[in-house]
Amino acid sequence: MSTSRLPNRSTRAAAALCLLLGIGLAVAVLGVLTQPPGSTRSAPSSSTVAGEASSAWGAANRQAATETEALPGPAEQRLPDASDAEAARPVEPSDRDLPPGDRAAAVKQGEVVHRLVLAGDAATSWPLPEPALKRSRAVTVDRDLLGRATPLKVGSRMRVDFFDDRCYVLNVQKVTCDINGTMSFVGQIEGHKHSPFAISASRQGLVAWLRDDEKVLDYELRWRNDDRVCYSLEIDPREKPFVGDLPARVPEDEENEAAALAAGGPVEDGETSDSPPVANADGTPTIIDVLIVFDTTAASWAAGNGGMATLAAQAIAKANLAVANSQIALTFRLAGTQANSYTYSGDMGTDLDRITFSGGSYSAMDDVHGLRTTLGADLVTLWVDTGSAYGWVGLAWVLSSLSGQPGYGFSVFSIRAVNNSQVMTHEMMHNLSCGHSKTQVTQPGPGPLYTYSAGHYFTGTNTVKYHTVMAYNSDGRGNTYVESPHFSNPGVLYQGTSTGVANDADNHLCIVNTMGVVAAYRAAAAPPVALADGVPVNGSTSSGNQYYYFDVEAGKNEVTIQTTNTAGDILDLGVNRPSTAGYP
């Protein structure tokens, strides 16, 4: 989590001039594609695809810097044998397929269940220290199931065998493909009320997290590029070490205070917002675009642990899971990822200053500000490798003006903590003025704008002690808590108990009040490509090469492409028909 700091400076923007180039291309729509009914996909083979299974998300995907390292090909992985290949096919489940004591009572006979884990190897265990680890094993996974030609869609059912006695059937409730072409899947364990999961997969690797809240255990899949193995881990969240933020540094800022008063002033105890947690007038959620910057240490760690694209997508998926659980009509969207040449200084305060400010002694990451404007990123997060997922792992500016502070939409935190908790979500919500629990000893809430903007501790009817995203997992009084993927909200129950307290612990209401102003920090970048009829489509940028992707409606055999490119550059166009392997 992070210390919250109040701003006092501003940022800058950059622009570029391009020359229009017209090109005609005839496309024959061949074969039976594995795309949703009514569409096919065309894409250059040299890049990842930017798209989205949900049209609301996909309509505005934009340019982003993408990774160039590749996940080992099928021949380089732990490969299934013939019996595993048979097991990989969709099956009609029965209770006999599931271990005794873990049979999914809600499994519906005759429905297809897709298997993700093909085989396990108990003799090979997770090679790194993990304080709360109970057991682990190496597993062989069906990567193609999570690829861009995935058969999974909303309503699909997927079986994951973390261990021989821990097999789960998962109900997929959301499928997304981000600007880097990374697929994410979110949903619930079938037959469980409070057991969410999030899975993300790219060419670089995959990562999965699942909470079995009946057993109060977390299950994860982690890809290790260093040894080219995927591992299954069982983790007890009650045994995780402390995760918190650095000593508070909140400078006085009279200018910001005056702006807040001019905008109506902080809401006092007992007052509530007139704005309910509803979607925009057109029925869509508010969208906050996020740029994720990896310093050299974080990029190195990511390269060995699933890849930047995979970890970034999973962090966004987990953030969206928390806001959805809290009944907030908000979506975080990945605007792009960047591998920056900056290296962690050893002090997050220094790093936050260097990414927030520009010029002079703060010029180390000046390029980030121009990229932020180009990609239309409302918030910017800097990931560094502190060497640990625990302890003091983050730092962020906290919003202190109702009129917004776009120059301070920045945060920094440990990449290992992002992998193990909701630290990125926590830090970004400081940017929306959310505060910690009022009852924790270290840096208690609330946030600066609302006295009710505070995290919350509560005990479920299952007797387990929980904390919401904005509260620490230890209150400093000898009590430890399990992370609940919620923001405090008196109107939402989890394990039979309210996740907040009216007028006292309601970060959800703070978010509803501030998300609109934060979402307007940067104008959403225009799509880099448009069809001849003016319909915007998706694109991304990687290392100076322009890659563009678009969906072609069924029945259309010709598409005219016009694109913009810098004079002197070479523009390569390619068309691929997605393969059943999932990686065209």
Image (cartoon, rainbow, N blue to C red):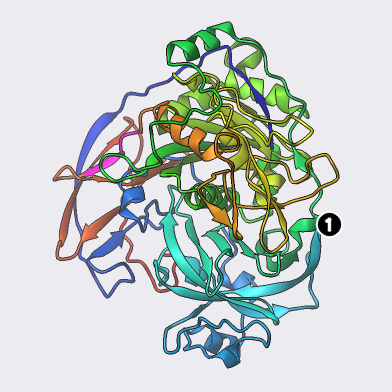
Say left or right for 265 vs 573: right
Foreground residue among 485 and 478: 478
> Whole-percent x and y of residue 210?
62, 64
Would residue 446 be visible to someone looking at this image? Answer: yes
Q: What stretch is highlighted in magenta?
A: 525-530
- Of the pair 240 and 539, the residue shown nearer to us: 240
Looking at numbered disc 1 in the image, what kind of residue is underneath it? Answer: Pro
User: Which residue is at the far front?
Assistant: 270
Say how many tags the image has.
Answer: 1
In the image, residue 341 above or below residue 536 = above
Secondary element type, mark 1: loop
In the image, residue 526 lies in the stretch drawn in magenta: yes
Q: Position of residue 576 (x, y in %)?
A: 33, 62
Check the image and name the residue furthest to the right: 478
Q: Nearer the viewer, residue 99 or 434?
A: 434
Task: Indicate whether 296 appears above or below 48.
Answer: above
Query: In terms of secondary structure, what is the magenta stretch mainly?
Result: loop
User: Residue at 59% across / 93% down in the picture?
Assistant: 96
Regarding residue 338, the answer to whether it shows in the image is no
Residue 211: percent from left, percent from top: 63, 63
Quadrant hosting residue 497: bottom right
User: Foreground residue, 224 or 401?
Assistant: 401
Q: Mark 1 points at which residue?
A: 129
Quadrant of the rendering where the N terminus is positioned? top right
- Left or right relative to 59: residue 48: right
| Magenta stretch holds residue 64 | no
Q: Residues within 10 Å of mark 1 (few under 14, many from 20)?
A: few
Question: Where is residue 5, by image quadrant?
Answer: top right
The C terminus lies in quadrant: bottom left
Where does the image place residue 7, in percent across and percent down from the top left?
59, 16
Q: Please determine whether, in this image, residue 479 is positioned above or below residue 28.
A: above
